[in-house]
Amino acid sequence: MTRPGSSSPFVSDVPAAAAVSAWLDACREAGCPDRLDPVRVPVGDALGRVTAEPVWATRSSPAADLAAMDGIAVRSVETHGASPTTPKLLAPGQYVVVDTGDPAPDGFDAVVMREHVHYEGEAAEIMAAVPPYQHVRSIGEDVSAGELLLPEGHRMRPVDIASAAAAGAIDVVVRRRPRVAVIPTGDEIVAVGSEPEHGEILDTNSMMLVAQAKEAGCEAWATEIEPDDVERIGAAVRAAAAEADLVVVVAGSSAGRDDYTAGVVADLGVLAVHGVAVRPGHPVVLGVVGKTPVIGCPGYPVSAALTFDIFAAPLLAGLEGVAPSRRPSVRARLARKLPSVVGMDDWVRVRLGAVHGEVVASPLPRGAGVLTSLVRADGLLRVPAGVEGHHAGEEVSVELLRALPEVERTIVAIGSHDLVLDLAASALRAADPTLSLVSTNVGSLGGLVAVRDGLCHVAGSHLLHPATGKYTLPYLEEMMPGRDLAVVRLVHREQGLIVPPGNPRGVTGLADLAGGRLSYVNRQRGAGTRMLLDHELSRLGVDPGEVQGYAREEPTHLAVAAAVAAGRADCGLGILAAARAFGLDFVPVAKEPYDLVLDVATLDDPLLAPLWALLAAPGFHDSIGALGGYDTTESGARIR
Amino acid sequence: MTRPGSSSPFVSDVPAAAAVSAWLDACREAGCPDRLDPVRVPVGDALGRVTAEPVWATRSSPAADLAAMDGIAVRSVETHGASPTTPKLLAPGQYVVVDTGDPAPDGFDAVVMREHVHYEGEAAEIMAAVPPYQHVRSIGEDVSAGELLLPEGHRMRPVDIASAAAAGAIDVVVRRRPRVAVIPTGDEIVAVGSEPEHGEILDTNSMMLVAQAKEAGCEAWATEIEPDDVERIGAAVRAAAAEADLVVVVAGSSAGRDDYTAGVVADLGVLAVHGVAVRPGHPVVLGVVGKTPVIGCPGYPVSAALTFDIFAAPLLAGLEGVAPSRRPSVRARLARKLPSVVGMDDWVRVRLGAVHGEVVASPLPRGAGVLTSLVRADGLLRVPAGVEGHHAGEEVSVELLRALPEVERTIVAIGSHDLVLDLAASALRAADPTLSLVSTNVGSLGGLVAVRDGLCHVAGSHLLHPATGKYTLPYLEEMMPGRDLAVVRLVHREQGLIVPPGNPRGVTGLADLAGGRLSYVNRQRGAGTRMLLDHELSRLGVDPGEVQGYAREEPTHLAVAAAVAAGRADCGLGILAAARAFGLDFVPVAKEPYDLVLDVATLDDPLLAPLWALLAAPGFHDSIGALGGYDTTESGARIR
């Protein structure tokens, strides 16, 4: 199953640091430039560019002694003897009216502020003697000719270009911008903007990689999408290598049937590394074609993004002669146990929130295909290859993707998933862009555990207590006896069976699940909806073992609806809004309360005040109503 | 001295927060928009733009169940019973070869990794039963149709645009980019690129402000430079207000002879604030013309930069509906006493370094005209209006302008100024872009105090000890008896009198200063060069009181040379390289050693290893030699 030019059918596990140095060695041996050529640009165009030589001042600033105040320029010797009791009159010629920034006239060596001058006709009366150079900015106060203003390897900011211009620079010598070509490959890949057919995948990776390169200060472009054809991919790599300073080939970096990147690189140049001990991102290709470094990056979007971060960004910074930008990090307490594979650097995306004065990190889904985990991440937690993982509550260091002050303005909701929380997040943000509400969906029970452990501000719960038939409240006594907890009603909502449009199997209720007649898609253990299902099945005398698909678990209402929409199941229990989102039909089963659980002390946290105000706003009730299947009569009421 | 349209000849001291809210109130009353209009852009062009409405997923990703591994797709029920002892053969049709990302064929619900498949002819042999959905990525695993992907008010990053595209977005609704017009004013202002004549000032401010606006994501441009003409400035403001979302008028914001901004704004619209209690930046104008906010910002470059930061940036973020970006901050120990005026927020630029494991902040020059203080700053320290200042060693909170990891890669040199340190800084940076050497020039004595107090890694010193005629070493015994200190020779260098080209006054040496025959420019107390002067004058029997200009102090060799070059003094004591930088002549006076003083423990700090390697490199000795006036025979030698 190997194909021409491939060095090995399987990928190796080279540690990331070793992979980088093997790659850079190969680039050096192939004669790749260490730094890009210097170019001369007008100083006004140098924003964001990196100096290729030091910038020395060729002109002092100010270039002459200047008045530092509005007032009159005087000769200090002529003020000697002036005092409030013996004011001195200066005749025109003995003083010159100056404004801030005016050059001190020849021979005039001090300035008296206008507030301290009175005019007697044409004469200026002063009440105090002044020392030489009072309120005078000396020549070179800012910068003297000959001074080093900026070192080589400095990325120019607005103050730098202004300062360089003031110190005499008309243009500056900077590195050429790195050029990055991204080559999307794959028979199944279609351009963004087209409507993908079954089995086709949108080329979002090259859009992302081009954007990452642009953010890093590069010129970047994506080429045409190449099919899985070794000749065409080879030709595309050769052509791109002639144009660019870095070529990124997207997908085909593993060792499967249609994975040509490693072979193409080995054929055209040097394959330095195939496979690094990084997760996600493992099947990475690092090589060089001609004098151009080439990266083959996996098609999983999280892998692609991290491959750029870990391998491309430092190389590009090196070509510009600047240190790779490093994200600040923060110490955080891990919200739950985090296992990790030994032997791989594991890059875990986490959500952060400041709860009760402590930063808490909640790991997000770890699949390489879950790009939304990176969208939603506030930070990256690297579990090094030698570490087996972390236990819950352990303090870890997290690289920040969002600034800490923003993290601190985040209402952390952990628990059951409901669209009303999404709606609230959006409404709060629209009213105050500094405020976020992020909800992590771990089911009602997981939410209550998070409240217990101080890991969230609020937990969304709709957990049926089978013994009492009540929701949520009985669990609080059982799990946190004596704890001072508040419960705020969010909504009542309708749960029901989500079925295909027109209800082709004629589903009438949960009783129809008996005997495996219908295929079902389930929610995970600990989810309120799962609890409702189990309760109802038991009430109806249906054994879960009879239910076809009972073992297939999905984490949200929307994922259940998606499974039904895709024809993978005949029905699944969920909320009306999820059915509507997919244009599906809905067979009502039960109406249930969905509540927010929190510590009583958290009620008065100013961070949450806008949430309570929102829940009381009639306009927001209307928006909830528009989703369908909700009853807002009690929304915002404190029920405990 | 007031002029038409001016509301008051003097500026007030409105606290910054009150100024902002008065300004925003005036904008609201004038009907300025809260948010800019939404526009629809292709998702690939949305990088850096702010969402004007939430982005909901309209398509699930993946849109079908996909193979998550390379291998074969199977029906899980057909694998039941397979084990290492009872392998099972699947005929073609019972399995389909799939690569990662391929859709699972209809009816096939699991994938077996290729590593676990052996082929017997056409049949595939498997050694284990697999559960349903093994190695299958479910439809919607990344995102389900109907899910909220991005809230309103979110600035799009590369992962966001890729994720939005994957979730079905072809274009997204974002805010129009804010438009910022900058109007430079002043009779003395000339465009960058022209050669300024005496009294003319380069228009570096509008270059900087335009760059600041572009960095903030705006479209920005500078108009023509307007002379100090109230009619013309008024016409320019009116025209710009019709085009832009924010107009910034540069200079003329105070209440001097040619300060028209406040009057123009009051005439054309509403003058909300004239003067805020912020230093630098005090004479700021905040108003509104038509429906466009207008800022009048001071001409001092540091004031201009901070005015943008404090007033323009938050307004522009608000127009885009996003939280103003906030810089991370760090706790640092103050290197010296920092007095501050009560009643003004004082924005002090500081250098930062990590010395002996602690972040140390050294205040930079505080003049509003010293733009290099902002260029060199690693952080901003705000001393609030109510605080009188801080004592040395006090812990303060500093807003970071440079990332902390970079600060930690900084060799901190405090002490005497020498160009060789500048040269070393540049060479170290060129070899390793992550490494900085920053030197703060406080004179030799100040450097030794900084070593004593643990505020720097090395101190540059050339301090003559008059009693012994030795340099530096005797002071170490006096100031830090018993301390384990090392001294590394940097260079020997020539000190002499810097005189105009051709030495028109025929200066022969320091004896010529007697009797006030020549005007002199001096260095500050504590500088080694000042010590040398005083020592030599005393040896020659010249009373400092006789020396004309003895009281005029400059902080560096280059500043002394600049003063001589400007004709403000006949001579000044300094190094040959400074004379050369200005094309001046030089009358040798003495050859002196210039040394680096440090704790012995610091010698082995890995951070400093590249510095010691550099001082030993012959190529670097050649570069020093090219400066002129240096002897590198002992460079790099440890002399204590």
Image: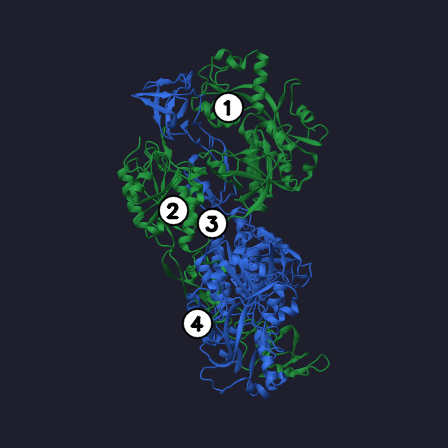
Chain colours: A green, B blue
- Between the C-alphas of marks 1 and 2, the distance is 42 Å
| Residue B585 visible, this orientation | yes
Q: Classify the position of the N terminus of chain A by image quarter.
A: top left
Tell me the residue that label 1 is attached to: A553
- Between the C-alphas of marks 4 and 3, the distance is 52 Å
Whether tag 4 and tag 3 are in contact, CB under 8 A, the answer is: no
Q: Subunit of mark 3? A: B
Helix, strand or loop under label 3: loop
Labels 4 and 2 share a subunit? no
Amino acid of disc 1: Glu
Q: Disc 4 or disc 3, which is closer to the eye?
A: 4
- Between the C-alphas of marks 4 and 2, the distance is 38 Å
Tell me the residue that label 2 is attached to: A23
Whether tag 4 and tag 2 are in contact, CB under 8 A, the answer is: no
Counting from the top left corner in percent of width and height, residue B495 is at 52, 77
Q: Disc 1 or disc 2, which is closer to the eye?
A: 2
Q: Disc 1 or disc 3, which is closer to the eye?
A: 1
Amino acid of disc 2: Trp
Q: Subunit of mark 2? A: A
Counting from the top left corner in percent of width and height, residue B423 is at 47, 66
Tell me the residue that label 4 is attached to: B625
Labels 4 and 1 share a subunit? no
Q: Earlier in the sequence, mark 1 or mark 2?
A: 2
